Image: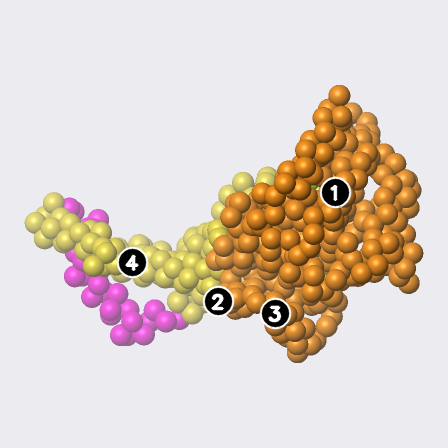
Amino acid sequence: MKKLLFVIGPIALLILWWILTKFGFANSFLLPSPEDTFSRLFGLFSSGEVFNDIRLTFYRWSIGYLLGCVVGIPLGILMGYSEKVYKSCEFLIEFFRSLPVTAMFPLFLLMFGIGDSSKIAMTFTATVFIIIINSAYGVTQTKKSRIKAAKTFGATNFQIFTNVVFYESLPHTLIGMRTTLSLSLIVVIVSEMFIGTQFGLGQRIYDAYTRNSVDELYAVIVLLGIIGYFSNKLFMYMETKIAFWTGK
Amino acid sequence: MDRKVVHIKVDKISKSFKNDEGRIEVLKHVSLEIYKGEFLTFFGPNGCGKSTLVNILAGIEEAGDGEITFPETNGKPKIGFVFQNYRDSLMPWLNVEKNICFPLKLKGITKSEQKERLKTLISEFEINIDLKSKVYNLSGGQAQMVSILRGLIVNPEILIMDEPFSALDYQTNLMLYEELLKIWRKLKITVILISHEIDEAIYLGDRVAFLSKKPASIFKVLNSDLPRPRKLEDMGSQEFAELKKKALEIFRNTAT
Ligand SMILES: Nc1ncnc2c1ncn2[C@@H]1O[C@H](COP(=O)(O)OP(=O)(O)OP(=O)(O)O)[C@@H](O)[C@H]1O
Ligand SMILES: [Mg+2]
């Protein structure tokens, strides 16, 4: 029974939404009814028109995100490994991380043009600094006693790295990856809305807005919510499988 | 057993560390002969340099001055090490089996040979710990036992244990004392154990080496000549009480 409690919130929200629209409490131009929204969402799928948007958004999202991870994790681990490197880079990384990527938007346009590369570059930028910080932090959290134990058993520096430090930093690295997974989705959508493109969920939202198609606007937002929710859940599940020892 | 074969000769070891205020001397002219096959315990005040001393013995740290030699062996003998804090020295991402075999893995020994050696080791002692279980699910005593087995997997000639029992409760310790003595009897290896419990040091050791406050040196070695094999009841015996009295006197002398 307890397991089913999580459906209560969404159901209550749907009922509230339905009441608001049904009895005219909300301006139907600002808030379409749930029936309209979901039937539009269904329509988007049954007509197949949304698939190209999903495909391209996923493409930009995954490339930007994965590049951010592939570049960020080794850099972060190296940075965390040497206190000197850590101390000297800390300010820079914190600075760039704190800059909203969306504020650098024009810069990306100038550098990468209006194609996919600027969107991917923005997604990458939103990902990479946070990944670096988390991986580096994870490495600094490595228990000295485990390194000492490995050394005592004759481990080389490389072995210490692959057999101890890597594992010790993994939980933190994964936290960084999960945080940036949602964040990078936001950035992709925003970049699609502002840097014109033909397909993409961000672009579809923007088009719906210019066409005054509120049903569709809400339908895509609901879709994005579902994508964001399940990607996060899936990642959390993987986290508990990969770094199963965390907190034990 | 001939107890007078010198296994490790510790010759005027000194060691100091840099810290904020300059240097602190931790060890000063520590000299001792450790015999082959004996069970030696080190006893001394907190922070006096016991860990530093055994780290130097194990070759994890360099002596600042002085020399460690192994007169009977060609080169450095194999040494097993058991740490005080088993939780922080076992690898939680490895299961029991892989933790025990960790030193072999580092040496590049094949998986099948690792398994073989583990089987031999386990069969020698009656150990009922599920090899596939996660180390963080073990009780403290089981975890430290895994840690001991990890120290033994390399077939060491010398087993060094840095306060292996100080993080565990008394009852668990009593059980582990028996296990450890059984292992020691069977393998006939030299065991060096740090303790801050005088009962433990006397009960386990053939000799108890007393370390002074920092900078530490050995100022007394007490022969703990209770007959072997020892049983836990021996801790209540007259002889034991007398040894403890001697130890107390030695300690009183250092305090002044
Ligand atoms: N790497 C190091 N750098 C600086 N000082 C150190 C280092 N290792 C140990 N010390 C200092 O040397 C002294 C002895 O440390 P050591 O750990 O050998 O003592 P111990 O007798 O094992 O203590 P405990 O009873 O806490 O286990 C301590 O004052 C400690 O602060
Ligand atoms: Mg110590």
Comparing A190 with A239, the one in front is A239
Q: Which mark is residue B122?
A: 3
**B51 lies left or right of B238:** right
- Residue shown at 20%/51% (left/top)? A13
Chain identifier, colour yellow: A
Membership of A93 in magenta stretch: no
Q: Which residue is mark 4?
A: A222
**Residue B128 x, y percent position in the rendering:** 52, 66
Q: Secondary structure at mark 2?
A: helix
Chain letter for mark 4, please.
A
Separation of residues labelled 2 and 1 (CA atoms): 69 Å
Q: Which residue is mark 2?
A: A59
Q: Secondary structure at mark 3?
A: helix
Task: Assess whether mark 3 and mark 2 are in contact (beta carbons under 8 angstroms).
Answer: no
Membership of A39 in magenta stretch: yes
Separation of residues labelled 1 and 4 (CA atoms): 73 Å
Chain letter for mark 3, please.
B
Q: Residues within 10 Å of mark 4 (few under 14, many from 20)?
A: some
Task: Give amino acid for label 1.
Answer: Val
Comparing B116 with A120, the one in front is B116
Q: Nearer the viewer, mark 1 or mark 4?
A: 1
Task: Assess whether mark 1 and mark 3 are in contact (beta carbons under 8 angstroms).
Answer: no
Q: Which residues are magenta?
A: A26-52
Q: Colour of chain B?
A: orange
Q: Which residue is mark 1?
A: B208
Chain letter for mark 2, please.
A
